[in-house]
Image (cartoon, rainbow, N blue to C red):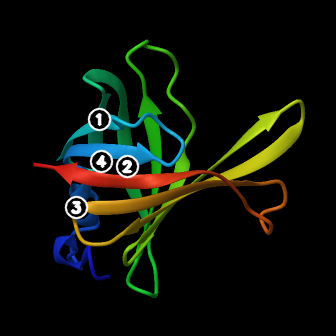
């Protein structure tokens, strides 16, 4: 783990997640030229780690993380869910696997009886830059890119 290595510690499964805290400029390849301003206010709250996420100054979600397994590679697996300001029911639990600089969020959606798998692959290049690619699959083997872009920490 090069970029995220300084944030990890063997005894703290939340160390890597602390990288999200702060302000980020998200530049989707097919998005607005001015980008999207993402701000995370993250904190460990006992057993859970949570990030309040703001997009362009508006709170959109409270994302809650919980570790589920330590991987033989030294990585970590988590589950996560989001609560929105509209007070609706929280989403289901989704997956996150962190192995070095590669973070993979995974979830699925079933519509009209058809299940589609999704993943968001984040590749860190240092603590202040992320390249992301969102993909979907019908079978878990063949993945199609839906969107990609870069995130840069703002000072």
Q: Indicate the secondary structure of the residue bearing disc 2.
A: strand
Q: Earlier in the sequence, mark 1 or mark 3?
A: 1
For marks 4 and 1, give the one nearer the viewer.
1
Q: Which mark is residue 102?
A: none
Q: Earlier in the sequence, mark 4 or mark 3?
A: 4
Query: Is there CB contact under 8 Å for labels 1 and 3?
Result: no
Q: Quadrant of the rendered structure where residue 128 is?
A: bottom left
Q: Which residue is mark 1?
A: 37
Q: Which residue is mark 2?
A: 65
Q: Quadrant of the rendered structure where residue 12 is?
A: bottom left
Query: Is there CB contact under 8 Å for labels 2 and 4?
Result: yes
Q: Which residue is mark 3?
A: 128
Q: Indicate the secondary structure of the residue bearing disc 3.
A: loop
Q: Which residue is mark 4?
A: 48
Q: Compute the Cα span from label 2 to label 4.
A: 6 Å
Q: Earlier in the sequence, mark 3 or mark 2?
A: 2
Residue in the image at 54% along x and 57% along y: 133
User: Pointer 3: residues within 10 angstroms few (<14), some, or many (20+)?
Assistant: some
Q: Compute the Cα span from label 1 to label 3.
A: 14 Å
Residue in the image at 50% along x and 27% along y: 90
């Amino acid at each position: 783990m090069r970029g995220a290595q300084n944030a990890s510690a063997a005894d703290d499964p939340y160390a890597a997640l602390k990288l999200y805290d702060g302000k980020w400029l998200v530049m989707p390849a097919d998005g607005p030229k001015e980008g999207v301003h993402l701000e995370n206010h993250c904190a460990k709250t006992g057993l859970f780690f949570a990030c309040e996420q703001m997009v362009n100054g508006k709170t959109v979600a409270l994302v809650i993380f919980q570790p589920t397994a330590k991987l033989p590679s030294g990585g970590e697996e988590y589950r996560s869910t989001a609560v929105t300001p509209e007070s609706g029911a929280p989403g289901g639990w989704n997956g996150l696997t962190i192995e070095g600089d590669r973070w993979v969020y995974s979830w699925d959606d079933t519509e009209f009886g058809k299940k589609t798998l999704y993943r968001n692959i984040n590749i860190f290049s240092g603590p202040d830059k992320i390249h992301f690619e969102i993909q979907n699959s019908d079978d878990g083997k063949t993945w199609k890119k839906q969107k990609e872009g870069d995130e840069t920490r703002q000072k």
